[in-house]
Amino acid sequence: MAKRHRDLTDADVAAFNLKAGKNKAIPNCPHLFVRGHDRSMAYYVIARGPAGRQVWHKLGRVGDMKVDDARAAARQVVARIKGFRWCMFLTV
């Protein structure tokens, strides 16, 4: 049986030391990443749409959003990307 990663807390994510342009995956949520910027970090969803192209969607900054909220939002965004319903992004 595969080893399960422990869930990250908000303090764990805030402790990431990412340089600008570097990504780190969040365990137990396949398409959720944290990306470093110059002075902050942000949650991103990275998924492939029906046409096979990679889509990046910014969810919010790490300090403004909890990890659990980011996971829930990521599930919804991935479903929209894979279903190719772009007009739904305007209602978020």
Image (cartoon, grey):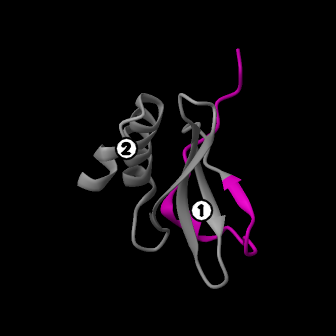
Magenta region: 1-24
Percent position of residue 17, x then y: 72, 72
> In the rendered view, would you say 63 is above or below 67?
below
- The answer to whether residue 50 is above or below residue 5 is above
Q: How many numbered tags mark residues here?
A: 2
Image quarter of the C terminus: bottom left
**Going by the image, does 27 lie left or right of 19?**
left
Residue projecting furthest to the front: 51
State whether the magenta stretch is mostly helix, strand or loop.
Answer: loop
Looking at the rendered structure, the kind of residue marked 1 is Asp
Q: Amino acid at mark 2?
A: Trp
What residue is shown at x 53% (from left), y 28% (from top)?
Answer: 50
Residue lying at 76% horizontally and 74% vertically, measured from the top left: 19
**Residue at disc 2, secondary structure:** helix
What residue is shown with label 2? 86
Label 2, label 1: how far apart the Cα atoms are: 32 Å
